[in-house]
Image (tube, grey):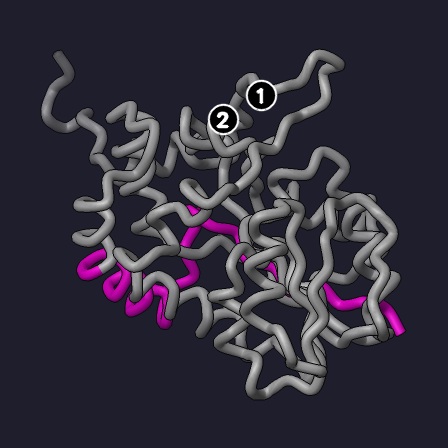
Amino acid sequence: MQPPGQKKSIAGTLLNLLGSRRAPAPAVPTAGDGEVVQPAAGEGALENHLGGDEARNYRKYEYDTVAPHVGRSLLEIGSGLGHFSEQLADRLDYLVVSDNDPYCVGELRKRYDGSDKVEVIHLELPADVEIRQQVDTVVMMNVLEHIKDDVQALRDLAKVTLPGGRIVIWVPGYMQLYGDFDRKVGHVTRYTPATLEKSVRDAGLVPEVLKPINFLGGIAWWFAVRRGGAGYPDPRLVKIYDRTVVPLTRGIERFVRPPFGQTVFCVARVPR
C-alpha cells in the first residue's frame, strides 16, 4: 500500500494513461483476406446513442463546432439519415450527401426527393468521387476512423474540393480508449492530434485547426468502456452524460485547451 503522499489522483492516472505512450493496436474485425470490415449501418443499428435523441446537447456540440467552418457548398461523407447536414441545408447553395450503406442512401433519396440543390450518392472511400461540381467544404463526422487507407481517402476528397476549401474531420480520439465498442462498429483506429496531422499532411492538406475536444467525455468513456467493459453506451447513462458532462466540458473548453479528449477535431485546408 502506498503512503498517502505517493497516491496518484484519478486525473493524474488518466493523464498518464491517455498521454504520449503509444498503446498496442487492438485487433479489429477483418474479412478472410485480412481487409478491415466496416459493418453496414442498417435500419436497426443506424445511429448510436452518442448522436441520437438521448444526446441532443452532444449533437448541438457537434454542430456548433463544425458549422463555422462550412461555406456555401458541402459534401458530407457518411451522412446516415441526413440529420447533421439537414441543419446546414438552408444556408447552402449546393449539398451532396453520401453513404456506403444502401439503406441510408435510399432514405437520403426519400428525404431530398425533389430538391434540385441536393445530390445523393453512394460512396465508399477510397474511390473517385463523382459529383456535379466541386465544393468548398467536405465534412466527415466519425468516418475516417473506418477507412484503412485514410490518406488516399483524403486525397480523393481533396480532388473534389475547391482550392482553398476545407475538409472538416471529426474522429474518435486516443487508442487508449479503444475497446469492444470500437471493434463492433469497425473502427480501424482512434486518432491523436499527431497521427491525424500525419494523415492530413501525407494527403497534401494543411491543418488549420487540430485539437482534442470533449475532455470530460474522454474520462467518462474510459471509465465506461475500458474500465467498465461496456460494449455499447447505455442510453440511460448517455442521457445523464448529455445533460451534465457535455455542458460542463463545453464551458471548460472555452477557456482551457484540453490535453486529450474523446474526440480529435481537424479543419484541413486544400492548397490553392
- Splitting the image into 4 quarters, where does residue 35 fall? top right
Specify which label sits upstream in the sequence, 1 or 2: 1
Which residue occupies 24% across, 26% down?
Answer: 228
Q: Is residue 234 above or below residue 103?
A: above
Please name the amino acid that badge 1 sits on: Pro
Picture residue at 24% right of the left edge, 48% below the top: 238
Decide: marks 1, 2 in contact (CB < 8 A)? yes
In the rendered view, does 18 fall on the left or right side of 139?
Answer: left
Image spot of residue 202 (x, y percent): 82, 47
Q: Nearer the viewer, residue 7 or 207?
A: 207
Q: Position of residue 113 (x, y in %)?
A: 62, 73
Residue 57 versus residue 179 in the image, above or below: below
234 lies left or right of 269: left
Q: Is residue 197 left or right of residue 82?
A: right
Q: Residue at x 57, y 48 (%)?
A: 103
Q: Position of residue 166 (x, y in %)?
A: 72, 70
The magenta segment: 243-272
Residue positioned 88% across, 62% down in the render: 159
Q: Give the structural element (helix, strand or loop) at label 2.
A: helix
Magenta segment includes 256: yes
Which dot marks residue 251? none
Residue type highlighted by circle 2? Arg
Which residue is disc 2 drawn over?
Answer: 183
Q: Which residue is mark 1?
A: 29
Q: Residues within 10 Å of mark 1 (few under 14, many from 20)?
A: some
How far, Cα to Cα, is label 1 from label 2?
A: 6 Å
Query: Which sits in the foreground, 134 or 199?
Result: 134
Residue 217 visible in the current orientation: yes
Task: Give percent across and percent down for residue 51.
Answer: 39, 55
